[in-house]
Amino acid sequence: MPVIEVNNRGVHIQELNKGAAETVLLVHGMFSNLSIYYFNIAPILAKHFHVVMYDLKSHGLSERIAKGYDLDSMTDDLVSLMDSLGIIKVHLAGYSFGGLIALKMALRFPEKVKKLAVIEAPDPNDDKTRDIIDDYSREFLEHYVTNFTDTTKVKMGKRQMERNHRMYEYLFHETSIKSDMILEKEFFSAAEISDIEQDTLLLYGSQSNCLGAGKKLKTKIRGAALLEVNGDHNIPIQEPVSVGNIMETFFNNG
Amino acid sequence: MDAVVSTAKLNSNEIFDLMKQFITEVIGEEFVEEMDITMESSFTKDLEMDSIEIVSFSEKIKAHFGEQIDFTGWLSNMDLDQLINLNLGTIVNYIEECQ
């Protein structure tokens, strides 16, 4: 069943290789959805692991919710999802905003996270937090244009434009997503970030404007490995096979 | 629900009709009525399906055909250009060969 009830809310999930001994749980980014993993990265990981993907609230096919986009609420959602699926502990990976959720999860619920992969998580305290949120919109649109229009980058079709527009309108104007994110701006500078004890892989694009955030995390998280992949913030789209293979190796070793 | 795995072998016309039914279920009848869906229709350009809609479409194929067709695995071997240009006829041929 793709949409399950978690705390009386509809959550869209997809699972691969259910019988595997260990689970990898994948968290997507803001204004995106689980499809960023579904076609390439998840099938690579599913060669060895049970893979769980889910759409964050108000994203993809999950139910719209007006409040609770701060990292505490987002990790509460993730714990509830794990509980409802009967999963005790996972290898956890998150991309962009999903990377922040993954980091917070490792801090708040270390007993539930085996290894941690953080892909292109931005520093919420980048001097232009507002710009970062605006960048997320551009990233989403670029993702769309790169993937779903032809190489001349013709404009989106009418139906897609309307769909995207409705999602932005909803998230920006009818939810607390912007104000909740601004409240997280001290996340990387808080002392607690150094408490992460899991094996941590930081995966960033070598041309990404978030690479500095990856370097900052490396200095704060003991033993964290920082790997650069050719590309910018959109490495899961630009280099999905590399990203999938690197994660597979990381979660498999030890 | 379409979670019943079909064991009957379908010909290409039947597969095409089934794909049209899945597309209608995913994007909605009101949009399909305005489209001329053919074997040449491309998923992204002609049908304007976005990534999460293609996920839903893939899940319908999985639910219908079960283990006999690894649709996601097949898609995952394509590069970006192939995915962008993927048309209904290519999918119908793939399913027909897998049965």
Image (spheres, coloured by chain):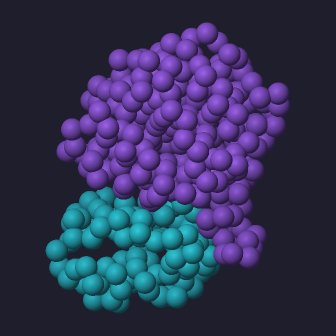
The quadrant of the picture occupied by the C terminus of chain A is top left
Do we see residue A57 in this rendering? Answer: no
Relative image position of residue B67 (x, y in whole percent):
21, 65
Q: Is residue A51 in sight in this rendering? A: yes
Instruction: Name the side, left or right, on which A208 lies relative to B30.
Output: right
Residue ID at (20%, 45%): A19
Residue B33 falls in image quadrant: bottom right
Instruction: Identify which residue, A2 or A91, lies in the foreground.
Output: A91
Task: Please name the residue shown 35% across and 89% down the image.
Answer: B13
The colour chain A appears in is purple
Q: Return the x and y of residue A209 as percentages of the image width and height.
A: 73, 42
Q: Relative to A101, is B18 above or below?
A: below
Residue shown at 70%/34% (left/top)? A212
* Figure chain in cyan: B
The picture places residue B95, in percent across and down from the top left corner, at 31, 79
| Residue sticking out furthest to the top | A191
Tell me if residue A46 comes above or below residue A69 in the rendering. below
Residue B69 pos. (x, y %):
27, 70
Q: Quadrant of residue B84?
A: bottom right
Q: Quadrant of residue B92?
A: bottom left
Return the residue nearer the eye: A73 or B30: A73
User: Is A134 or A229 nearer to us in this picture?
Assistant: A229
Looking at the image, is A220 positioned above or below residue B72? above
